[in-house]
Image (cartoon, rainbow, N blue to C red):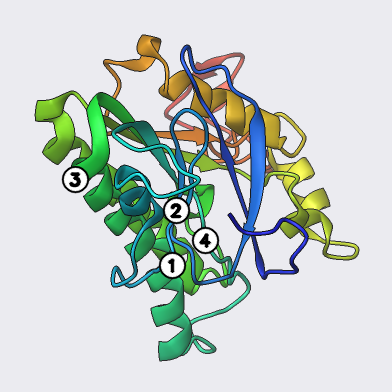
Amino acid sequence: MPNPNTPYGLQAVSYAWGAPYAGATRTYYVPAGNATALFFGDPLLGVTNSSDGNGIPVLEIAAAGASGYISGVFQGITNNAGIQPLGVAFEEVTGPLLERTFAVNVNGVAFGLKYAGRHLADGGRVINLASFVGLIGVPRGTAYAASKAAVVHLTKLGAIELAPRRITVNAISPGTILTPAVTRIATNPEIPFIERRTPLGRLGQPEEVAALCHFLASDEAAYITGQNIAMDGGLTVGWTEYDLVPPANIQHGRWVDDV
């Protein structure tokens, strides 16, 4: 497994479930742009090693019974690794940036679904991590927002293809979560902005995302598939600020036509 003390460029977080899906949270650090997914079984297994599908995924190695891994079939997969090139407008976007973003964020999910079909037990679970920016338009989100919108649609396609084996495929679109990607930016303007615009008035916690992952992996979620759940404090519901003045037609709680 990757050494957590190695200064890799990407923090990828996943959660280990064993029956009845009540395992502990674990964090692994993987090279930015080089990992596609984190897998969970009993216990957490590891990461794939290629965003282009040409490497040997850990799931394949584990299934073959390689030293240090559990052989056989698995309960589920969490596609969670990604890069986050926010702040880039259309005028600034380049081909290499788009290609790298989609290779990690989109190809990783697509290949994760591919290997899930090979190695998940019937009735297993796939959970894809998308983002609220894949659901609404945001300025300067060209590459990242588009990649997360693709994750939402891949979730639907995977749900259809894996349904005959009772494997559910769902996505979570978190809002802004208090992870190092947010907190390590000095005086990050996103934090007060999200606190002001989110109906619940705060950022999310990683443990809250973990709780939803646990639910989607449980037997209670066996009839939920192909869905994307926005876990964003209400951010995508609508505006919290909209200054309006009622028209003169509204008088004493009634609409008056001739004004």
Q: Residues within 10 Å of mark 2 (few under 14, many from 20)?
A: many
Q: Is residue 244 visible?
A: no
Residue sitting at x 52%, y 31%: 43
In this figure, which residue is indicated by the disc labeled 3? 157
In this figure, which residue is indicated by the disc labeled 2? 37
Amino acid residing under circle 4: Gly
Amino acid residing under circle 1: Val
Q: 101 or 190, which is in the foreground? A: 101
Q: Closer to the N terminus: mark 1 or mark 4?
A: 4
The N terminus: image quadrant: bottom right
* Horizontal and vertical percent position of residue 236: 53, 40
Amino acid residing under circle 3: Leu
Q: Closer to the N terminus: mark 4 or mark 2?
A: 2
Q: CA distance from mark 4 to mark 2?
A: 8 Å
In this figure, which residue is indicated by the disc labeled 4? 82
* Horizontal and vertical percent position of residue 86: 60, 69
* Horizontal and vertical percent position of residue 39: 44, 43
Q: Residues within 10 Å of mark 4 (few under 14, many from 20)?
A: many
Residue sitting at x 77%, y 54%: 180
Disc 4 vs disc 2: which is toward the camera? 2
